[in-house]
Image (spheres, rainbow, N blue to C red):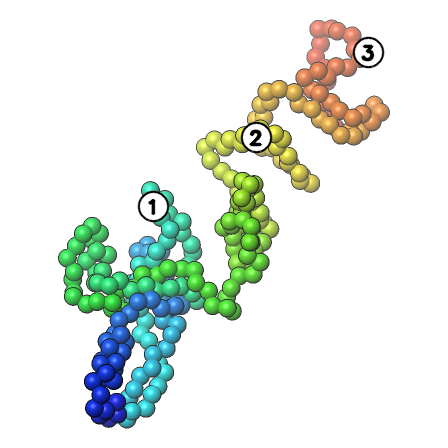
Amino acid sequence: MADRRELVDDPEIALRVSIRGHQAGVWTALPGIITKFDPDKLTCEVQPAIKALILDEKGVKNWVKMPLLVDCPVVFPSGGGFTLTFPLKNGDECLVMFASRCIDSWWQSGGVQVQAELRMHDLSDGFVLPGPRSVPKVPGAVSTTSVQLRNDAGDAYVSIDPDGQMDVVSPVNCNLSGANVNVNASGTILLNAPDIQLVGNVAITGTLDVSGKVQSPVDAEFDSIKISHHHHSGVQNGPSNSGPPLNF
């Protein structure tokens, strides 16, 4: 069935219809939903989240799902030998941006390549940018004062505020490992926990001050023990060793 606008003897209308028809084949960017993630190739299969309006042979308009976009390279922030990655999952939302020319040769070989095909703004040349969120999937309690790397629940994050204060928060375990781990502070390092365990040899340079109210089974309650200056009174020197430490 012919478009009735094609029957109107008006060059301006005909030109508008022609331009609009051309625009319909130029793909720029679309929101999408990830259906498969390949962590080895860093590519995604994506379902476009916008339906297409199709006019069938009878002139009836139908909204239909667009085809899956396959082998779309994922754009993670990276540079200088470093990459910030995310464990993408099926159902994650994203933005797919379409290159103006065919990317096949570049994707396969890198460097500067000739075009494998002379297509332009095609659905086959999409890059996936994870991150855009529809209203139902917006994470709550986003900080308005600090930069954060966080989970969607907001109960685990690394945060830096404009003054330089840094917080690392987790409802479960925080693990730090390395060949050598150095913690330096110009002020105080505070460890506050119901139970603190040190496994391995402990070397202390300086004074070890055990502060607070400590109850000895033989002496009265005392406030502080500085081990480097700690002496016992009423003891006579001799050639023998003392007995083992007492268990309190």
The x and y percentages for residue 184 are 54, 30
The x and y percentages for residue 165 are 56, 41
Q: Label 3: which residue?
A: 234
CB atoms of marks 2 and 1 within 8 Å? no
Q: Is residue 102 above or below residue 192?
A: below
The circle drawn on residue 79 is 1
Label 2: element kind: loop
In front: label 3 or label 1 = 1
Residue in the picture at 25% in, 84% down: 13
Q: Nearer the viewer, residue 48 or 237?
A: 48
* Residue 20 visible here: yes
**Residue type at the position of mark 2:** Ala
* Mark pair 3, 1: CA separation: 69 Å
* Quadrant position of residue 108: bottom left
The x and y percentages for residue 158 are 53, 47
Label 3: element kind: loop
Query: As drawn, is 75 to the left or to the right of 239?
Result: left
Q: Label 2: which residue?
A: 185
